[in-house]
Image (spheres, rainbow, N blue to C red):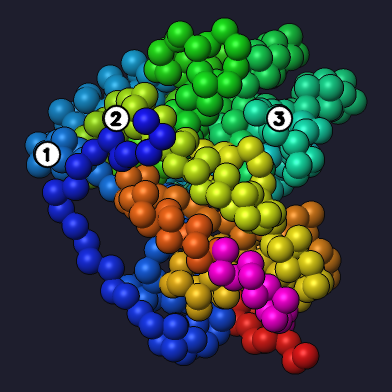
């Protein structure tokens, strides 16, 4: 069968408020042309992020009802710990309220001023947590990642030659850990191959450097390995995930992604002495080590979600439905990052609106137009997000001008995706009439969240 069906039935619905184009013209004006400042209820299809926006299953909700809210040693903790241990395999497991809390604890202990942390591509919170400890976050994406036309299946890979050179040039003493992000969110949601993970681990082990995985989308990554890497066709996705983590010394995880939960995270390591120091910080800032900033019911939801996310029917549907949107956009000639990643569709707004220069923010203009056209909310990943150096105040074009449409897990149906495809197609037809934008007001740091915009005059 060619038709993609959601491998779940719907037994509870949340109505979507349908707005008219005229209403949306006013709503986005009131939001200063920044989709972050819209009320969520004024959005028809919300593709701002896949983080914490997933739909939980009836089993996950049922597990929440049996959450044990004891302060220490709750049953929920043991269910959570045993599940994480079974899939990820690490000895030491610490729950946190979300992924960045795990990052802060890890880097706060391991990173010194002058440290260098390589990654395929750091996510923004990972980078910020390293930099706030005085370290330098270095991105080492593979060469294929910058070829937008290439269909190379593992564009999330790290550049192995560049990693070896960095270790040789800077010395292992300056590199407290090597990290790889699966899938590579900031690099287009592209997966990392098992071969690449084995190589990174080999380099890390021979240099005596701990190897960590930013595991947010570990299940999607493992399933890409099953579907695209020769030799894994007949391996269960859960076993592929287990093998990935067997090469690492620890991981950080945001349960808001591939644990299909609305909140939560964890930090893992095999180093008992390090874990003791991490637990001391955990108690100080998150909570007692058996709950780490989460309610017992959240720990139970994560334990169920981690099992469900590894269901291969779910993962087939997840990857296929993202691929479906990308393929339909490509068929219309719309420039999109290819091949499709797992959790999001990345439209190349710089190419889509090639008449708008980067400092007039084509990604932002496209985000606004897509909202006006169909009430769809995406996020600019380009010069608005990355173009300002907060220390010097200087602005320069970002490497890419993208509009990211992130797809929440199990929330939208196939017809919602058809609606998205149609809406992007309509905006594509009238792209020549779209104007650039200018910033009216913006803070120094993380300006994309609150900046205010207006259209430039023609
Ligand atoms: C790759 C990656 N790492 C870390 C994080 C941070 O996780 P959280 O939002 O739970 O703090 C995110 C969140 O989007 C992410 O995508």
Quick check: 256 left or right of 205? left
Relative vertical location of residue 40 with respect to residue 224 in this rendering, above or below = below
CB under 8 Å between discs 3 and 2: no
Quadrant placement of the C terminus: bottom right
- Density class for disc 1 (Cα within 10 Å; few <14, some 14-19, many ≥20) is some
Span shown in magenta: 425-441
CB under 8 Å between discs 2 and 1: no
Q: Disc 3 marks which residue?
A: 152
Q: Is residue 309 magenta?
A: no
> Quick check: can you spot residue 446?
no
Quadrant placement of the N terminus: top left
State the SS at label 2.
Answer: helix
- Residue at the far right in the pictured view: 169
Whether the residue under disc 1 has CB within 8 Å of ligand 1: no
Residue 315 x, y percent position in the rendering: 40, 30
Cα separation between marks 2 and 1: 14 Å
Q: Nearer the viewer, mark 2 or mark 1?
A: 2
CB under 8 Å between discs 3 and 1: no
Residue 308 disc label: 2
> Quick check: can you spot residue 220?
yes
Residue 62 disc label: 1
Residue ID at (70%, 81%):
433
First reached walking from the N terminus: tag 3 or tag 1: 1
Residue ID at (50%, 18%):
226
State the SS at label 3.
Answer: loop
Observer-nearest residue: 206 or 439? 439
Residue 5 x, y percent position in the rendering: 32, 39
First reached walking from the N terminus: tag 2 or tag 1: 1
State the SS at label 1.
Answer: helix
First reached walking from the N terminus: tag 3 or tag 2: 3
């Amino acid at each position: 069968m060619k038709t993609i069906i959601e491998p779940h039935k719907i037994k509870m619905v949340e109505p979507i408020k349908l707005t008219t184009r005229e209403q949306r013209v006013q709503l986005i004006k009131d939001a200063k042309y920044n989709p972050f400042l819209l009320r969520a209820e004024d959005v028809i299809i919300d593709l701002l992020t896949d983080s914490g926006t997933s739909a939980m299953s009836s089993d996950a909700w049922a597990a929440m009802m049996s959450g044990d809210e004891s302060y220490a040693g709750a049953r929920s903790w043991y269910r959570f710990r045993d599940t994480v241990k079974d899939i990820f395999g690490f000895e030491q497991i610490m729950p946190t309220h979300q992924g960045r809390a795990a990052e802060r604890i890890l880097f706060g202990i391991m990173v010194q001023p002058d440290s260098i942390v390589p990654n395929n591509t750091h996510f923004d919170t990972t980078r910020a947590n390293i930099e706030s400890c005085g370290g330098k976050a270095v991105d080492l994406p593979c060469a294929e990642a910058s070829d937008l036309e290439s269909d190379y299946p593992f564009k999330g890979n790290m550049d192995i030659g560049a990693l070896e050179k960095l270790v040789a040039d800077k010395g292992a003493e300056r590199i407290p850990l090597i990290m790889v992000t699966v899938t590579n969110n900031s690099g287009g949601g592209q997966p990392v191959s098992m071969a690449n993970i084995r190589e990174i681990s080999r380099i890390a082990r021979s240099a005596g450097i701990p190897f960590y995985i930013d595991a947010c989308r570990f299940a999607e990554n493992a399933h890409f390995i099953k579907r695209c890497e020769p030799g894994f066709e007949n391996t269960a996705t859960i076993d592929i995930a287990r093998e990935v983590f067997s090469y690492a010394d620890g991981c950080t995880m945001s349960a808001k992604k591939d644990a299909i939960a609305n909140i939560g995270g964890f930090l893992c390591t095999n180093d008992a002495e390090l874990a003791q120091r991490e637990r001391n910080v955990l108690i100080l800032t998150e909570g007692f080590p058996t709950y780490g900033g989460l309610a017992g019911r959240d720990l139970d939801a994560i334990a169920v979600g981690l099992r469900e996310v590894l269901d291969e029917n779910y993962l087939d549907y997840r990857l296929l439905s993202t691929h479906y949107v990308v393929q339909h956009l490509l068929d219309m000639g719309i420039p999109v990052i290819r091949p499709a990643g797992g959790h999001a569709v990345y439209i190349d707004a710089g190419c889509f609106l090639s008449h708008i220069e980067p400092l007039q923010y084509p990604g932002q203009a496209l985000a606004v137009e897509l909202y006006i056209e169909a009430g769809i909310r995406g996020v600019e990943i380009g010069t608005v997000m990355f173009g300002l150096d907060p220390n010097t105040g200087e602005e320069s074009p970002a490497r890419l001008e993208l509009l990211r449409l992130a797809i929440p897990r199990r929330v939208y149906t196939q017809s919602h995706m058809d609606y998205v495809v149609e809406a992007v197609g309509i905006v594509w037809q009238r792209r020549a009439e779209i104007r650039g934008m200018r910033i009216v007001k913006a803070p120094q740091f993380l300006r994309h969240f609150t900046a205010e915009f207006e259209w430039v005059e023609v």
